[in-house]
Amino acid sequence: MKRLVPYPTVAGPVELAVVRVRVDDWTLPVQLVNTTDRIVALHTDRGTDWNEARLTVAVTTAPGALRPEHHGRDQACTAVLRERATNSVTAVRLHPDGSGAWTGEVSLDHTRHAGRVLLEAHLTATVDDVAGRIIGSTEPWNVDLEARTPTAVRTVRLVQVDFAADDRPELHRFRADPWHVDAWGDPPVLYLNKAFEGLVDLLHADASPTRDTVAAQVGVDVWSTLFLAALGAAAESGDDEPAVPGGWHGTVLKRMLPDVFPDLSPADALAEALKRRREGDAGFHALVLHAAGRPARLNPMLGGAIRALRRASESGR
Amino acid sequence: MEEADDFGPWLGRQLRRRSMSQNELALTLDVTRAAVSAWVTGRAEPRPDKKRAIAAALGLDEVAVTVREETPTQAASVTWYHRPAHVDGGREFGNPAAFAFDADLSVLAREATQNSLDERLDNSRPVRMRYTLHQITGKHLFRFLDAIQWSEIEPHVQAAEDPKRKTGRVIADGLREMRENSSLILLRIDDFNANGLTGSDYDDGRFAAVVRRQLDSSKSSGDTAGGSYGLGKATLWATSRLGLVLINSTLSETHEGRRERRMIGRLDLPWHVVDGREWAGPGWFGEPDRTRGDAARSWWADTETAASLHLDRPEGEPGTSFLIVGAHDASGDAQDLPAMRDKLVRSLADDFWAAMTTGGGRPPLLEVTVVTRRDDEEGVEERVDPHVHAPVRARALRAFLNGETVDAITGPTDVARLSVSLVLPARKAGARGDAPTRHDAVLLVTPCADDDRHANHITAMRGNRMTVVDRRIGGAGVNTVAFQAVLLAGVAAGDASADLAAERLLRTSEPPEHNAWRRTDDLTASYVRGAATRIAEFLKAADVAAVTAVARPEPGGGDMPAPLRDILRLDAAGAGRTTGYPTVKDLDGHLQEDGAWRIRVEVRLPERPDAWHLVPKLRFAVRGGGGLPVEWATLVARSNCTVEGDGSLTFTPLSRSAVFEGVSDPTSHPIEAALSVAQVDLARAVGGAR
Amino acid sequence: MPTRTTATTDQPAHIGLLPDGVARAHLTSAVLRGDEVPPARTVDRLSTSPSDRAAPRWEAAPVRQLLLDTTGRFRDHRPTTADRWLAPRLHTVLRLTRAEAADPALWNHLALRIAPEYVVWRWCPAGGAVAASRFSGPFHVQALARLWWAAELFRDGPDYAPVVTACANQDVLNTVLRSQAILHRPVAQALLRLVGEDGGLTGREVNALSAAVGAAGSTLLYEVLAPDAETDTEAVRAWIGSAHGSYVPYDTLPEGPDDVRVPQASVDALVPRFRGFLADAEVRGRAPVPAP
């Protein structure tokens, strides 16, 4: 979103690099630090029993981008760790290293964080006699306590299980179903019923019209469920004017709303969807199924399957 | 100061100059032919009275014989010899070896530097090389042309111009450039602490390998004599538009009793006709050898001659200087001096960064500088620094040499040291029962920036640390940290017998360009079946080891059925979809004196026949939140829209963009505007037409 | 006041974790009206335990007792008035790390299994039903999470006095609690100082101030203007792990973890600025819509 700031800000990118990560007394291998997607994965083979992660960070601006006569005096750089889920914020002043970068160490306390922690840095200065003004910010990093690998890929979790299993009481009521979507978790979970004869084998088999048709059907179920769950999350935010929520809820809404209401902005589309959901009209349900078809790849999968079947029957003739 | 010439070679030279046979001298002095032969070959030295007689016979004074003075007019006795055309009418239109290479400056740098590296004399010190790009014009040019007796070769060069043939075209370009601009580029390549062009003028040896022979591969002539000057030397001539290279060598061991300023020039032209006479093409600049039909042979030059040919060298430092006359970059990439210098530096860095890297308290194998100068300017000499031009790999190698490698990479400059095995195939000849069967090569892996030119590359080399392989590892970069890998094989890894055996194997598997390890005729001839496969396995293992060292853990869901993989991805973007609703394209604005925001808003509109009817919403941003609504005091339409009474906007149907301006109402500001960040978006007008 | 027709029998010994999905499935209209409690045995089957379930801090009895005592103690008052009393005491009884408190399953279990009576008492309008999100919802909405988090975010080190100030004002709980700016402790304390001053602030003023603080936070980095002291994670850890069953005073304010206090200088630096925001908003004569 375009924004206007009433004083000069730093031109060009302000970049934050995570140089090294110490977890208690050992150092995280670089493979767990993804500098392209800005992700640190903290769930390692060493387990979750650690106290503190210390991140060495360096913040840089484009050479010559920061000018005192233009951007004010008392220039400083502060790194901030922030996690909404645990309401925890930690700010650390970084120090100029003499070569135009600010460096320092940010400490992440394990008891104060649970999932994805944002790490960003802000440049501040006294501008027009107002101290502590933000004149530049970095793109945030994600320090992910639950990630085993620093990938930006987020997917619905897949659990293949017997729905009648003793340790799955929550699935017992769905025991006769081929699959079940739990859209409450983060990430949401797709359960495939191993006790549903042939289903898991079919999905793992080589491509076939039947397999692709089933997969597309699963996809429509998953995405329509996710969409409704995301709408629910938006409704519960407690705002008078519901905003697109964060996390996977926001991702799903941003992806599907344009197909539900193509000529509305996301905010308007969300408001409209919430209204239609409250009114419970069937036309809305049809729109949701329509929108779910795209991420479920319904048209290509089903179209390809039908074509394959036709080809098979023609060649069999 | 040069040591005194041995008497024998001196005498032989004097006889040659006078076209006087040993027999004639024997008759004149009344001694046996065998006695003269013994003097010339150095087996015996004549008594003083015989020396006086020799002086008389040669028309010299006695002192000249004692101090073995050279003929003072020596430079004048140097001349051009052109090889007559084959009597059978055969014609060659270029040096076949030169065609085997894409002879641009980078190939030249690679071949010439490799030769020097392989000719290193004192292994405790680096070979020093200097590449000088020297542009001469005007009187400097004419002086140089005089020195090379240009008038003598000009007809030949001109005759070889031929717009229909590659070589002929290049020559034509060279001549035109020289005449029209009266300018010539000389590329001089010096090496120091190298063997120099030792050996006879004609028989096996380094000199003959460079000056006399073509397609003389190093392997066939054994591992020592002339060993290093293989096919690559042709690139020297291919780099000259005129096919002309002059040479001055300081020898590491005496030849004819001398070391300093052994000089010769060679002109490589295609077949041509001058004054109705056919010429084979090549010509040599040197001293006429009466015993070989006045063919030119190398001569021992004085310092003035060397200087006039732009080939003066400091005394006592063995090595060779090549002067490429009319140098150019055959690829056409580098047209002027700075571009040629840049290309040279880049090539030298890419191919020899490792040889130039220092570590472990030892000097590098090689030091290279590049100089550019014009006429008699001093020029600027720049060292090719591996830490500047190949910083990541040089850092990796230095860590290895300094013993500073680590097992696991935890920081951006860490270097992991791994081991990669090469199963050594048996040699066909001379196989011994106790021959080593496995070589452990060293693989260095270190992180680099994602956008590094060499990201995810592996560079492989053996003992001389010249880059043999430099390629991107397929499949790397998908789920790996960006990295660079260096594979040190053979003697680069160590000096155990297995390392030496691997060095020999890999060298045998290099094609003439030394740019791969693969099946070669030599390999097939020297090693048992399967040798090429072992090498391929070795390279594959290195790739795998490098990728493994920087691979990220697999994300979960390895058990995901294939058709669900894409369907269950949450983050896949709605790729390539244009928005179907109006959006704010640009905001411009400032604070007014009264503390209100004045904002100009540019809107992008999807084209449609019905008017868009929207409300512009001004908000003050909240960190981590949505924003606080602020009201407009005034709204003014600028283009493609009208402001309605209720503060909404109606956009002109079918328009694709619109502009309006607004001023905020300070009484609605949740905070003074000076502390705010303003943002504008467009919402559906409630109750309005959609 | 809704009637409680079903008494919860066989109380669980420990606090458990009840995932959102199954929690929501049991929030029937009867439960939300307070006519029933969720089926105990089913809920137990669907619940899991914290990894260190044997630790005394997971005992269910003290927290259940506290919540039941709250309904008794404030029987004759408006339930909102109980918040300022309950919040610090709930925080003392529930020794949680922030990471643990971030798990909605914990709050689901407390609300659906340990003390549904409290949720109904506090949130059920006469003749109406409790909103499902008071049982299972975001931290600033869920009946118990909002009080625990208010105590956690508004305490000044070991001192719960600002928590009492905060929870005495429903606008602070409804609006300020979810503002990102107050996660920086000096901002929270400066704001509460104005709230707690003589005369206090009206709900409208609280909302206006909170909005102004949030909006100014887009250009001002409070972390630089008013630095906080580093949290004493060791002390907090020790407090969380210390023996449970310690006596929770009902008539005097309990003491919180031996955490570092918010630097007074930082609070002092922000107070006049916030006062200015407030005066500014007054001048403008209108209270903006609450900040999200």
Image: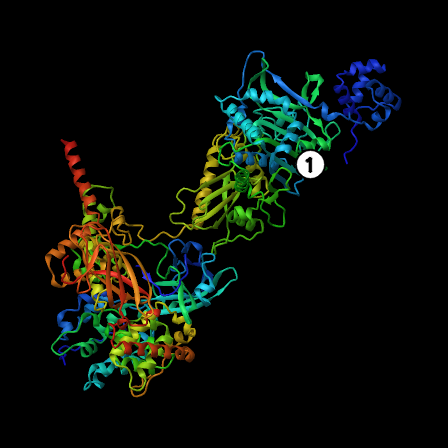
* Residue located at (83% from left, 19% from top): B59
- Asked if one can make out residue C36 in the rendered structure from this viewpoint, the answer is no
Query: Residue C148's quadrant in the figure?
Result: bottom left
Farthest residue to the right: give it: B49
Query: Residue A247's quadrant in the figure?
Result: bottom left
Colour mapping: rainbow
- Asked if one can make out residue B446 in the rendered structure from this viewpoint, the answer is yes
B291 vs B511, nearest the viewer: B291
B375 vs A116, nearest the viewer: B375
Farthest residue to the top: give it: B88
Q: Mark 1 points at which residue?
A: B313
Position of A12 relative to C186 (above/below):
above
Quadrant where the C terminus of chain B sits is bottom left
Residue B469 image position (x, y, % from top left): 49, 38
Amino acid type of the residue tagged 1 in the rendering: Arg
Position of A34 relative to C207 (above/below):
above
Quadrant where the N terminus of chain B sits is top right
Residue B200 image position (x, y, % from top left): 69, 25
Position of A121 relative to B289 (above/below):
below
A152 vs B678, nearest the viewer: B678
Residue A86 image position (x, y, % from top left): 33, 68
* Residue located at (49% from left, 65% from top): A95
Residue B600 image position (x, y, % from top left): 29, 60
